[in-house]
Image (tube, helix red, strand yellow):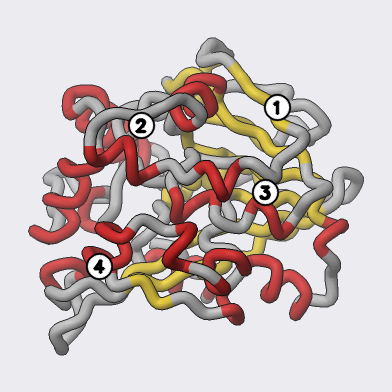
Amino acid sequence: MRIHHLNCGTDCPLGGALFDGRSHGPLGHLVCHCLLIETNAHGLVLVDTGYGLRDVADACARLPLPWRLMLNIRLRKEETAIHQIRALGFNASDVRHIVLTHLDFDHAGGLEDFPHATVHVMQREYDDATVPHTGFVARNRWQERQLDGVTDWRRYGAGGDPWFGFDAVRDLDGLPPEILLVPLPGHTWGHTGVAIRGDDGRWLLHAGDAYFYRGEMRRARRHCTPGLRAYQRLMEVDATSRMTNQERLRRLSIERRHSVTVTCSHDPVELERCQAGHPL
C-alpha cells in the first residue's frame, strides 16, 4: 500500500509560536493531516477528510463562528482532499472508503465530496454527533450539514483484539486487515486512531486529536505549547481518559519507535516530515 500525507486545511490562530512552536509572526500555522491510501484490491482509502468544497464555498453556513474566529481558518479549494486526489490522477469515485478518527467539523468536512464512499466510524462517535447537543463545545464541534449527505455508514463497537497493548477493531467491512481502528477516547468519547501496516511491516498510527503537538510524543516528559494545551482542554470530554491515552501513546512512540510511527492531525512539522519520508 502506498500512503500519501495530505494537508486538507490550514488554521492560522493568533498567537504564533504559542500554538505551533515555531512561527515568528503573530499568526500560527496548523494543518489538517489526512491520509490517502492506495490499496491493491480495495480502491482508495481516506483517513479523515479535513475541510471540503462546500466548506470553502459557504463557510458561514457550515463552520461554527466561534471556531472560525478562534482558529482563523483559511479555506482553500486547492487544499481540499478531492482537489488533491484529482491532482494525483484519480476521481472521487476511486475513493471507496473513508475511515474517520472522529466527526469534528475539521475532520469530516469533505465527506460529501465522496458520495459513493463507505464511511467507517466508531458507533459512539456517530451517536454523539447525530443527537441534539447541549453545551457550548458540543453544539459547535459536530455539524449536521457535513454529515447528512452520507448514505453508507459502517459503525463499530469498542471491543477488539490487542494491538501493542491497545484494544483494536480489526476486520473493518470491505477493508484489508492492514487497516484497523484503535479507540482513544478523551477528545471525544468515540475518538479513535487509525493504524495502517505498510508493505515494509512498519505501522503508521494516525492518532487524530489524541495529541496536538510533536513534543507530546517521543520523549519521556510531555511538552506542549500553551495555545494547544488550552485548546485540548477546551475540546476534551474527559481529561483523565485523554491524558491516560496520551501517556500510553507516548510510551508506544518511545518503546516501539522502530516498528510504529505515531502522528497526529494538526502538527505541521509532523506532516512535513511524513511528506518528506522522514517521520519524527
- The tag earlier along the polypeptide, 3 or 1, is 1
Point out the frontmost of discs 1 and 4: 4
Point out the frontmost of discs 3 and 1: 1
The image quadrant that residue 226 belongs to is bottom left
- The tag earlier along the polypeptide, 2 or 4, is 4
- Tell me the residue that label 3 is attached to: 198
- Of the numbered discs in the image, which one, if any, rests on residue 69? 4
- Tell me the residue that label 2 is attached to: 188
Could you tell me how far apart the alpha carbons at marks 3 and 4 are, in whole angstroms?
38 Å
User: Is there a contact, CB below 8 Å, between mark 2 and mark 4?
Assistant: no
* Three-letter amino acid code of the residue under disc 2: Thr
User: Is there a contact, CB below 8 Å, between mark 2 and mark 3?
Assistant: no
Q: Height in image: 211 above or below 275?
A: above
* Three-letter amino acid code of the residue under disc 4: Leu
Residue at (54, 11) in percent of width and height: 159
- Of the numbered discs in the image, which one, if any, rests on residue 154? 1
* Three-letter amino acid code of the residue under disc 3: Gly
Give whichever of 177, 110 is nearer the camera: 110
Image quadrant containing the C terminus? bottom left
Q: Is residue 90 left or right of residue 180?
A: right
